Image (cartoon, rainbow, N blue to C red):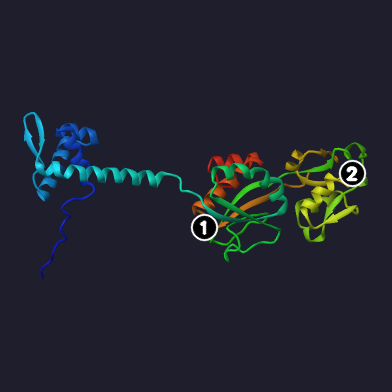
Amino acid sequence: MQVRMARRPLVELSDVPDFLAAFRERSLSAAARRLGVNQSTMSRRVAELESRIGPLFERLPEGLRPTPLAIRLLPHAERVESDAAELRRALHAPLAASGTVRVAVAEAVAVYLLLPALAPLRSRHPDLSLELLAGDALVDLHRGDADLAIRHVRSSRGDLVTRLAMRTRFAVIASAELAPSLGPDPKRWPWIGLSAQYAHLPESRWFDEHIGVEPVLSTNGYVLRHEAVRAGLGVAPLSRTVVRIPGLVAVDPGLPPPEPAPIWLVAHRELRHQPRVAVVWDFLLELLGNHDPDVGEAASKGLGL
């Protein structure tokens, strides 16, 4: 049985740097230094190339003299060199982010954290559009109902990528007008509560354990609760970040605060590194991490909480 060996191409891409270095330096030793190899390796490479395509250089006492073949090949080799450099730049350049990214997020997070911070993202990526799907229901990322989700519960399915974005830390918040009128007994304060469907949340459990009175107002909407507090209707355990809203202040009921509540950033594994999704993912991790120094510092160190 006769076995045929595959023939090596006359010229390979790896030959181009050797040829150009020898042509430009007119010396095998100088070409070797340019490419960071020893002279014997450089000499072997050029001789091997010449064995395939023909003589490229005359070896003279004063150095290498290009043959007509080498002169004819020079512009083609330089074009390959230029194209390879363009390819490297393209590989390392950040990919342009364009298109629409749908983010499922609780309305309060969207109103009080996302909206005030979106202008810089828009200026950096003018071809990027966001669609905020506000609500507390869990959207189905597997079905493509959203590209990203900001959730209060961790997703455990293997084809979802989940990162801890921040922990919501709570304080009892009141309007600046109402705060001075509050007495020493927090059970006599007017409280704004959450509806029974949110009884499992840390702030609801805290209220039932430490306060346990009938709220003056209950709602199933986080934004409504924030606005009720800002309107001076009562007090409520809210995220400390809302203290930045003009007219709101933290008050001390003399009780330990509710336990911090984690907020998770979730994406489908197949979408996570698409340019449009990756840009928004990184933006949200940085934004939310800035509201939680512990998580933000861990993320900057690549700890991936």
Answer above or below: position of 180 versus 127: above
Q: Nearer the viewer, residue 263 or 125?
A: 125
Q: Nearer the viewer, residue 90 or 176?
A: 90
What percent of the width, then of the height, locates residue 204?
A: 80, 53
What percent of the width, then of the height, locates residue 11?
A: 18, 50
* Disc 1 residue crowd, few under 14, some 14–19, many 20+, Cα 10 Å: some
What percent of the width, then of the height, locates residue 256?
A: 80, 42
From mark 2 to mark 1, how far is it between C-alphas?
Answer: 48 Å
* Quadrant where the image shows the N terminus: bottom left
Mark nearest the camera among 2 and 1 is 1
Q: What residue is rendered at 74% in x and 42% in y?
A: 240
Whether residue 255 is visible, yes or no, is no
According to the image, label 2 marks what residue?
Answer: 186
Q: Which comes before the other along the chain, label 2 or label 1?
A: 2
Q: Nearer the viewer, residue 44 or 19?
A: 19
Count of numbered labels shown in the rendering: 2
Q: Amino acid at mark 2?
A: Pro
* Disc 2 residue crowd, few under 14, some 14–19, many 20+, Cα 10 Å: some
Q: What residue is rendered at 50% in x and 50% in y?
A: 97
Q: Amino acid at mark 1?
A: Leu
Q: Which mark is residue 271?
A: 1
Relative to 302, is 232 on the left or the right?
A: right
Element at label 1: loop
Q: What residue is rendered at 60% in x and 60% in y?
A: 146
Q: What residue is rendered at 19% in x and 34% in y?
A: 24
What percent of the width, then of the height, locates residue 117?
A: 64, 43
